[in-house]
Amino acid sequence: MKPDLFKAPDYYHINDLLTEEHKLIQNTAREWVKREVSPIIEDYAQKAKFPKQIISGLAEIGAFGAHIPVKYGGSGLDQISYGLIMQEIERGDSGIRSTASVQSSLVMYPIFAYGNEAQRKKYLPKLATGEWIGSFGLTEPNHGSNPGGMETNFKDKGDYYLLNGAKMWISNAPFCDVAVVWAKNEEGGIHGLLVERGMKGFSTPETHNKWSLRASATGELIFDNVRIPKENLLPNKSGLSAPLGCLDSARYGIAWGAIGAAMDCYDTALKYAKERLQFGKPIAQFQLQQKKLAEMITEITKAQLLAWRLGTLKNEDKATSAQISMAKRNNVEMAIKIAREARQILGGMGISGEYSIMRHMMNLESVVTYEGTHDIHLLITGLDITGLNAFK
């Protein structure tokens, strides 16, 4: 087992923009990834299993509910701290970051923002410690980029709601304890419901044969006449803007996380290029390899500045959905291009599990599509700058 010798690139001294608390949080997450994730992740990805034993560690480094107030079990951190944690975790593996960002942004956030005090007190402390794991049910078999067309529905039966339908491509689904599920009522209004494991008619079959996010547990949420207590409806926000608000938080975390994957690929390629000898000299001395590496560090630096500025806007409550979409789209595209170039630098060794690059590349093929596809985010930016809606 090779030691994790990762050295984070910081070409523009962006760390100087961070507070001492930010640096401590980042270093804590980085050292945890080196100690707990790097030694095991290749094996778990090969076996297509999620390493459940790391859940408590994710909680300890603040990955669950980083920006949720301390009174509910969260860490009470700012948005840049949350981003840095996501960056370090995704440096280890996108699938592990998916577990953390779903828990924080798609489960804890809507319960905190849209739930009542009783719901916050019941669910958030357990989710913050990892005692409970959550999932987020929006995407359906027939509705991905058009979530407003969802078919999952619930009917008011007097003492309870009756929920029917199905969600797919759901991270954490196979072992989730609670799912935040978006469904339409009889009038077509969209609401969030808290569905707990053990409710009759609720099942979570696992999705197998994935070539991407293999160390993440993915599955379906199936509802067959599930009785939902009325107190499990999130009361403080309804309509499509409610789940989209959750996605803003998750997409923000992805914009940071993708930088971590890109950093790992760049660092691996740089080290390899300096050590690999061909024609009597290190391949890093050849012009074409220097071109690849120079372009990588340039794009990583641009993405770091984009994420940092977005984080400051988030802290000031000024970041728009369109700005978040731009960062998610740009930074994931950047990361996947770097992964592909890094793989070429390593040649045949680039596809080996001895190195992380091919795993990152496969993972990023999912990240570029989920939480809004690459093209959808492009159209969100297009709408924002032209005022003309390409979705209608």
Image: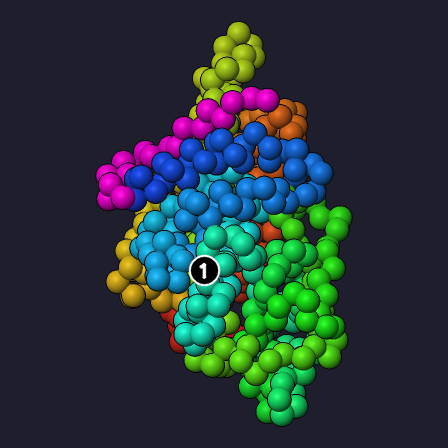
Of residues 228 and 281, which is closer to you in this image? 228
Q: Residue placed at 62% from the left, 59% from the top?
A: 176
Looking at the rendering, in which quadrant would you find the C terminus? bottom right
The region drawn magenta spans 1-21
Q: Residue placed at 31% from the left, 39% from the top?
A: 24
Up/down of 140 relative to 9, above or below? below
Q: Is residue 160 left or right of residue 22?
A: right
Is residue 17 on the magenta stretch? yes
Q: Is residue 296 visible?
A: no
Q: Residue placed at 30% from the left, 39% from the top?
A: 23
Up/down of 114 relative to 322, above or below? below
Q: Is residue 367 left or right of residue 164?
A: left
Can you give x and y, in whole percent of width and height, for residue 30 in the image? 42, 36
Q: Is residue 308 visible?
A: yes
Can you give x and y, in whole percent of width and height, for residue 352 in the image? 66, 28
Q: Is residue 203 left or right of residue 284?
A: right
Up/down of 290 relative to 183, above or below? above
Please identify the quarter of the rendering in which residue 342 is found.
top right
Is residue 284 on the magenta stretch? no
Report the predominant secondary structure element of the magenta stretch: loop
The residue that disc 1 covers is 125
Of residues 311 and 44, which is closer to you in this image? 44
Looking at the rendering, in which quadrant would you find the N terminus? top right
